[in-house]
Amino acid sequence: MRMSDGELETRLQLSIQRALWDLVTPNLRAIAVRIESPVIHARFMYNEVSRSEVEIVSEVEAYVAADFAPPLEPRFLPVSVADAVPRSLDEGEFWVYRRAEKP
C-alpha cells in the first residue's frame, strides 16, 4: 500500500525528530526537508559545520534510512548558515526543526 504525501511527510518528520535524540548540538539552527521521491533531501543548517556535526548528520541519515524501506533514499547535507544570515526554505522544503532565535 502506497503512503499519501501527507502520511510520508508526517512519518519523515517523526523519524528525523527521533533520530535527533541526543544529537542536537548548540550550533544546529534548523533542518529543512524536501521530498523528491524516491530521494529525501535534508539540509542541516549549522553556524559552522564541524567534523563532529558531519558525522552526526550521517548518523541521523542512517537512522532515517532504517525507518523506510527502499526505494526511499535519504540524502542529508550539513551546511553552514551563520547567525547573521536568516534561515529560509528553498522551494518545496518544509521545516522539521528550528531552534528559538532572537529576531
Image: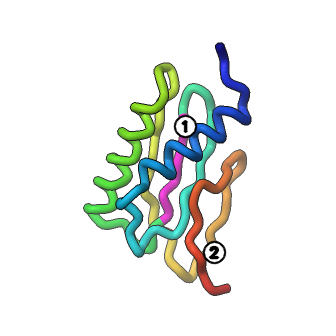
The numbered mark at residue 86 is: 2
Is 7 one of the magenta-colored residues?
Answer: no
Circle 1 Cα neighbour tier, 10 Å, few/some/many (<14 / 14–19 / ≥20): some
The numbered mark at residue 70 is: none
62 shown above or below 47: above
| Closer mark to the observer between disc 1 and disc 2 | 1
Give the residue at x 50% y 76%: 82
x and y, in percent, of residue 31 in the image: 54, 58
Magenta span covers which residues? Answer: 40-45
Q: Main secondary structure of the magenta part?
A: strand
Residue ranking furthest to the bottom: 102
x and y, in percent, of residue 42 in the image: 52, 48
Is 43 one of the magenta-colored residues?
Answer: yes
Circle 2 Cα neighbour tier, 10 Å, few/some/many (<14 / 14–19 / ≥20): few
32 left or right of 89? left
70 left or right of 5? left
- Mark positioned earlier in the residue sequence (1 or 2): 1
